[in-house]
Amino acid sequence: MRFATKAPISVCLILTAFSMQAESLPDVLSRMDKAAASFRGLTAKLKRTTYTAVIKDTTEESGMIALKLGRSREMQVRVDFTSPDVKTWAFRGRKAELFIPKINTVQEYDLGKHAKLLDQFLLLGFGSRSQDLAKSYTVKLIGEESVDGQKASKLELTPKSAEALQHLKRVEIWFPSAAGTPIQQKFYLGSGDYMLVQYSAMKLEPELADSAVRLSLPGNVKREYPGK
C-alpha cells in the first residue's frame, strides 16, 4: 500500500512562501540606517533622464558622480557629465558651480535660502537616516521591482513642507535588497515633468579626498555670476 506524502511538500511550500515575502517598510528603513551609520562617501556611474511634459521632450545625460558627507553632515557633490555635452557641477554649502570646458567658463550660483532644500534632495538615500527622512517626508513602501536585474524595494517620499512641494511633488527611490544606498531615484517636479537618475558601478569611498568633489579649474578660466 502506498501513502501520500503531501505534508513535507506543504511544509516546503510554506517555507518558500515565507522566504519570498517582500520586505516591510521597517526592514528597508533599518537597512538604510545601518548604511547611514558608516556612510562617508561614494563614487558611481550616473545616467540622468529628464522629461519635459509641455514639449514632450526627453533628454539623457551620463557621467560620474562623487559624494562626500562631512562631519557636520554637509554633503559635497561633484557630477562630471561626459555625454552628450562635457560639463561639471559641484555643490557645497550655499554654493553651486558649473564648469563648461568648451567655453572655459565656470558659473557660480548662490543658493541662498534654497541651500537646505538642495541638501535634502541630494541626501535622499545617501547617508540618509530614517528619522531625518520622517521629519521632511511622508514615507511609504510601494513594493518590489527589478531594476537593472536587481530586486529592489521601492519607497515613495512626499515632502511635508509647502515650500518643498513648490519644487518637488514626490520622489521614488529604489533600494536593492542587499544595500542601504539607492540604485535609482525618480523626482516628480510637477506638470508632468520628472527626472530619473540611475546609478551603477557604485563604490563606497570612506576616505574620499576633497579634490574628488571640488572643481579642478584652469588658471585662465572665466568666472560668471548669473542672477547677480
Image: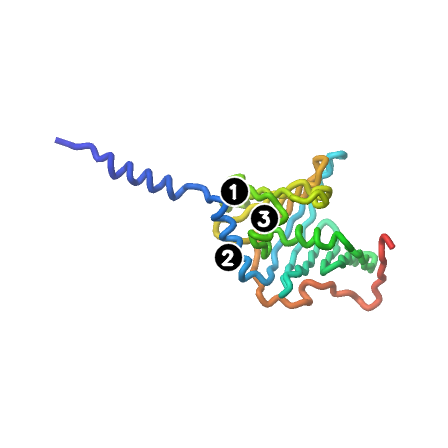
Q: Which of marks 2 and 1 is in front?
A: 2
Identify the residue position indicated by label 1 in the image: 146
| Crowd tier of the residue under label 2, counting other residues whose Cα lies within 10 Å: few below 14, some 14–19, many 20 or above | some
Please, what is the three-letter code of the amino acid marked with disc 3? Ala
For residue 134, which numbered disc appears in the image?
Answer: 3
- Mark 3 and mark 2 lie on one chain; the one further toward the N terminus is 2
The numbered mark at residue 34 is 2
State which tag comes first along the sequence, 2 or 1: 2
Residue lying at 51% horizontally and 44% vertically, measured from the top left:
153
Quarter occupied by residue 41 = bottom right
Quarter holding the N terminus is top left
- Residue 113 placement (x, y as % from top left): 76, 53
Coloring scheme used: rainbow
Q: Which residue lies furthest to the right in this view?
A: 228
Q: Distance between the residues labelled 1 and 3?
A: 26 Å
| Upstream in sequence: badge 1 or badge 3 | 3
Relative image position of residue 115 (x, y in whole percent): 73, 55
Q: Are marks 3 and 2 in contact (CB under 8 Å)?
A: no
Q: Which residue is drawn at 63% across and 61% down?
A: 73
Helix, strand or loop at mark 1: strand
Q: Quadrant of residue 78 in the image?
A: bottom right
